[in-house]
Image: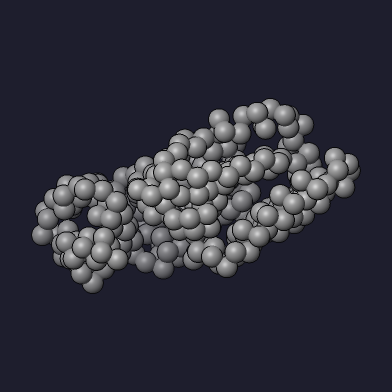
Amino acid sequence: MFIQQKITDRIAISHDFFKEEAAASKSSDFHLELVELLSPCHAVLNNLPCQLDSYDIVISKKLPRLEFFNREPFSLRLVSLDFKRQSVIDMLTMANNGLVHDVFKDLDGSESYIHYTGLDNLICHEALNFCQKIAEDGEDDRFLDYELSLACAGFLTELSRHYHARVRLDSSRFPSSNVHYTNSKTRTGMIMNYLVANIQDVTLEKMAEYFGYQPKYLSRLIRQLFDQTFTQLKMETRVAISKSLLELTTKSIEEISEIVGYPSVTAYYRAFKQVAGMTPSEYRKFAREG
């Protein structure tokens, strides 16, 4: 197990940070990498700028390059967990958590990660502290791996509670394995990933073709998964993306309108106000003053 705390104003994190620890744990059959924010900052996740709060966690089987930045110094910690036996994790966590199973069992080897937010009750933070305490104080014997597995299973289970409130679908990157054979939580994330990546010209027909569904079936599936129509989901996703761009970039409203796929600024203003209750200009002023 490796935990490193950093205070910085800009950092790019990837699997390279954990290479030595991963190499030293070649006998491990369960490897996990994560970043925990200890103070607010900004990041580029899923190719979009976003705001991260204290105790947010980005978790992956193998972290791709992720950029974190802020005007003022911020603090984060990097955690790597390795276990020689995955049986305890499987038994206590993955069997009842399809999302975790899909991320860590993804056979495509795709760069996937999940962004968890709303963790300010500190349970996950203290669970990581507990894992660290076990690793630092425990001897390398037959009990240590089992004890760490139990602690990690509790940590992953806590992350899975209140899934819809905690996982940010737009800033997570879900595994690219066949959508037909994933659980509903991962399927929701994969649909959102496609929507975000193709927001300029996405249509129900194009999305259905990409996933191998009939449009009518995909329409029903989206209503089932998101409790929205495809049109509602697309509009709210466009507004969510543009909110991040309004807050964290200096792009003009005309540029943002084009980025999120509106044919005219007038149409963009109308959709944004319908969802957010204010115009893009008012939102930018409110976000920056707040």
Left or right, 138 with reference to 282: right
Measuring from the top left, give residue 263's x and y in whole percent.
14, 51
Measuring from the top left, give residue 164's x and y in whole percent.
50, 64
Which residue ends up furthest to the right in the rendered image? Answer: 142
Measuring from the top left, give residue 27's x and y in whole percent.
77, 31
Q: Could you tell me if residue 242 is visible in this image?
A: no
Q: Quadrant of residue 246?
A: bottom left
Q: Quadrant of residue 34?
A: top right
Left or right, 50 with reference to 258: right
Q: Could you tell me if residue 200 is visible in this image?
A: yes
Q: Quadrant of the N terminus?
A: top right
Q: Would you place residue 217 above or below residue 175 in this image?
A: below
Left or right, 174 with reference to 46: right
Colour setting: one colour
| Front one among 225 and 22 | 22
**Residue occupying image coordinates x 64% and y 43%:** 3
Q: Quadrant of the C terminus?
A: bottom left
Q: Would you place residue 211 above or below residue 274 in this image?
A: above
| Front one among 141 and 132 | 132
Which residue ends up furthest to the bottom in the rendered image? Answer: 277
| Front one among 165 and 51 | 51
**Residue occupying image coordinates x 46% and y 62%:** 225
Number of on-image labels: 0
Left or right, 35 with reference to 96: left
Measuring from the top left, give residue 261's x and y in whole percent.
21, 50
**Residue occupying image coordinates x 55% and y 30%:** 16
**Residue occupying image coordinates x 63% and y 49%:** 101
